[in-house]
């Protein structure tokens, strides 16, 4: 991978972190409402994954979507504006934290019904197959989502119909307060692909370069063979499930242990081992991410709310 | 009388019935270790243990299907849907299995099941997480649909629901858990299928339930300042629907406004208005009006969401219109 690409990935990871930290503050200040699920701790997964896609490859994910949106090229301005419910947001302020999307960036949404977007992902790929396109649909979801019927129906048809879907399970150890072993009969999520005869793999989701390699390889396979693949990324969310989670289900020691394994720290150390990257360059990137976050907050705060006409617009296409 | 919150009332009903009958158990997402997403079952897991307060995977079909199966063989499951919006992921069990098994098998089966679910808008959760689709569920014979508006009713109705031998959908409103009200000391039950006058008045009948009751009581206070006395009839149960107190009130006031949080089209208001026209047409002095949610999926933006939901001024305006 060339230096520019590596530094861009570093920038995105830091930007996601800063945007969400500010988001959390704005939530506490009452400027953001509803449910907000932070991606902090998991940044390496979507960063590595999406760095490996071609722009024509589609992305669809669950409600924990701020990071995915930024990696897909949606600006921090638009993400922040959506969080604040402003008309300049990705969804005109009508979707909120859980519903970021951009057709232009081939990002088909954060979706809030657990597992609900998996059959839709199969449909994106079906549409591409039908139209003779060889692009891949990257569908991300949590460990908890693999226990609902949607997951199994979608995996089955994707295999049966030879769909180009890269299924990516972000195993962050918990679905809300329920640890994987309390909800899933098998502890490695990738095992679930076996029942459908689907190729699968597991990767360290805290190591962005490992995720990138695994994503590249599996995406090549999906494109070449016209077959789905299930990739499990082992990761951890550092914050609560959403804002206001009492976190009675895990110990502070456990959280601390994972935080010591910060994906941004790991990447920084890896980058500094390279001869052509200096600490000063990385510091400069961090400062830029910080400044861009500040600009995004200012942009969002200054943006107007959607007008009353937006209430009735887009219920149907002709509105 | 004790003054408690809606949350405490529901929690007490569950607790008392679990103490009373070992066949009663709870299953659902985050009901145990977490203590319930809305803290209704806080402390239950430690007291009753993991078998009677069963945490499940995110699998609404498995939750409801298994609850129905367990009910068939003699248990009294209380299946919790984290929100009513997730009923759509398992709609078959709610409307196509639980309500039909007894009838279809010639009365051999009993399905003593309670499905508890939180619904309602106003919390900026976006279109898929904010619905009040109560009327949808009330469409199906074989299912009882209960939706209380006071702590007293919540407790008494939930206890009855748990003892009912038929499936009951028990709808709670996400913004009402902190509502306080007087609750009788000691054990009491409230029958399913009885409407109730929650505030007497002579000028106009407001028919409502759940969140609509909270709003209508406020609207009635406003109207009283202007000398308008609204009588509020709380449906409490949507199916079976008890029109008795509604008709009695309407025959006295000759004017009615129906208030619901769900969408107007094909809603609770449509049903109630049709029944009034069918059974008391000659008493009408004005068209029956409906206050309901605007016909849009609920948006995230707070201002837009509030504009879409029925508000107190919508009710007072409708009442004045009905009195013209
Ligand atoms: C069908 C459905 N059931 C329940 C929920 C409530 N819910 C939202 S997120 C969540 C946990 C999901 O866990 P996981 O799939 O592991 O994703 P994570 O939050 O860990 O990223 C639950 C139960 C929902 N949104 N949709
Ligand atoms: Mg998870």
Image: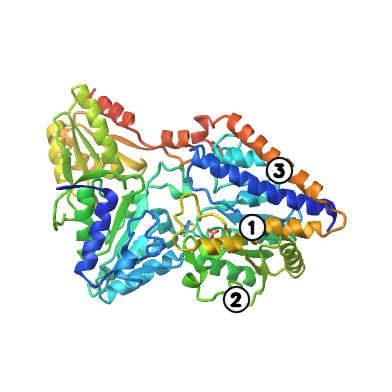
The chain identifier of the residue carrying mark 2 reads A
Residue A160 vertical placement versus A291 (above, below): below
Q: Residue A124: which disc?
A: 1
In this view, the residue in front, A100 or B134, is A100
> Circle 3 sits on which residue?
A289
Where residue A248 appears, x then y in whole percent?
A: 44, 60
| Chain letter belonging to callout 3 | A
Outermost residue on the right side: it is A276
Q: Give the residue pinned by disc 2.
A: A191
| Residue occupying the point 41% across, 61% down | B34
Q: Is mark 1 within 8 Å of ligand 1?
A: no
Q: How packed is label 3: few (under 14 Cα within 10 Å), some, or many (20 or more)?
A: many
Instruction: Tell me which label, 2 or 1, sits earlier in the chain.
Output: 1
Report the mark closest to the observer, 3 or 2.
3
Point out residue A113 in the picture as x, y percentages from the top left corner: 50, 56
State whether residue A131 appears in this view: no
The Cα–Cα distance between marks 2 and 1, rounded to whole angstroms, is: 24 Å
């Amino acid at each position: 991978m060339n230096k520019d690409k590596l530094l861009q990935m570093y920038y995105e990871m830091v930007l996601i972190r800063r945007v969400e930290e500010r988001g959390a503050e704005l939530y506490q200040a009452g400027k953001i409402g509803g449910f907000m699920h932070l991606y902090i701790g998991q940044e390496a997964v979507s960063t590595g994954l999406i760095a490996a896609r071609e722009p024509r490859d589609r992305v669809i994910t669950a409600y924990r979507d701020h990071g995915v949106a930024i990696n897909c090229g949606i600006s921090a301005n638009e993400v922040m504006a959506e969080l604040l419910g402003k008309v300049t947001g990705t969804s005109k302020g009508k979707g909120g934290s859980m519903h970021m999307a951009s057709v232009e960036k081939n990002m088909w949404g954060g979706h809030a019904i657990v597992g609900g977007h998996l059959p839709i992902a199969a449909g994106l790929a079906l549409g591409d197959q039908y139209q003779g396109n060889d692009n891949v649909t990257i569908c991300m979801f949590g460990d908890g989502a693999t226990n609902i019927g949607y997951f199994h129906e979608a995996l089955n048809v994707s295999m049966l119909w030879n769909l180009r879907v890269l299924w990516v399970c972000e195993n962050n150890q918990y679905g809300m307060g329920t640890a994987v072993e309390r909800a899933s009969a098998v502890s490695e999520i990738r095992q679930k692909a076996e029942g459908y005869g689907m190729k699968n793999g597991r990767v360290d989701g805290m190591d962005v370069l490992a995720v990138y390699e695994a994503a590249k390889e599996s995406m090549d396979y999906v494109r070449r063979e016209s077959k789905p693949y299930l990739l499990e990324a082992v990761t951890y969310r550092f914050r609560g499930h959403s804002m206001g989670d009492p976190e009675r289900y895990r110990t502070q020691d456990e959280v601390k242990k994972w935080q010591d394994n910060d994906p941004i720290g790991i990447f920084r150390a890896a980058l500094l081992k390279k001869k052509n990257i200096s600490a000063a360059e990385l510091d400069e990137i961090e400062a830029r991410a910080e400044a861009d976050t500040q600009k995004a907050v200012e942009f969002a705060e200054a943006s107007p709310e959607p007008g009353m006409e937006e209430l009735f617009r887009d219920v149907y296409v002709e509105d | 009388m004790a003054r408690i919150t809606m949350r405490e009332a529901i929690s007490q009903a569950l607790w008392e019935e679990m103490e009373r009958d070992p066949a009663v158990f709870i299953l659902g997402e985050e009901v145990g270790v977490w203590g319930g997403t809305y803290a209704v079952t806080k402390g239950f897991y430690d007291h009753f243990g993991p078998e009677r307060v069963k945490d499940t995977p995110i699998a609404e079909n498995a939750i409801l299907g298994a609850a129905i199966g367990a009910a068939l063989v003699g248990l009294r499951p209380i299946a919790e849907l984290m929100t009513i919006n997730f009923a759509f992921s398992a709609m078959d069990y709610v409307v196509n299995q639980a309500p039909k098994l007894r009838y279809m098998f010639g009365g051999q089966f009993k399905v003593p099941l309670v499905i508890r679910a939180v619904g309602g808008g106003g919390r900026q959760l976006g279109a898929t997480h904010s619905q009040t689709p109560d009327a949808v569920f009330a469409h199906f014979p074989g299912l009882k649909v209960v939706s209380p508006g006071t702590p007293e009713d919540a407790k008494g109705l939930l206890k009855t629901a748990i003892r009912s031998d038929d499936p009951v959908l028990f709808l709670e409103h996400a913004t009402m858990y902190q509502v306080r009200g007087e609750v009788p000391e000691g054990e009491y039950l409230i029958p399913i299928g009885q409407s109730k006058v929650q505030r007497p008045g002579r000028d106009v009948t407001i028919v409502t339930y759940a969140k609509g009751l909270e709003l209508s009581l406020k609207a009635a206070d406003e109207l009283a300042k202007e000398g308008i006395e609204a009588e509020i009839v709380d449906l409490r149960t949507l199916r079976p629907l008890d029109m008795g107190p509604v008709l009695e009130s309407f025959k006295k006031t000759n004017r009615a406004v129906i208030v619901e949080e769900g969408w107007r089209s094909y809603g609770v208001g449509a049903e109630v208005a049709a029944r009034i026209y069918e059974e008391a047409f000659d008493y009408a002095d004005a068209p029956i009006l409906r206050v309901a949610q605007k016909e849009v999926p609920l948006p995230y933006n707070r201002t837009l969401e509030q504009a879409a939901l029925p508000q107190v001024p919508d009710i007072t305006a409708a009442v004045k219109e009905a009195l013209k």
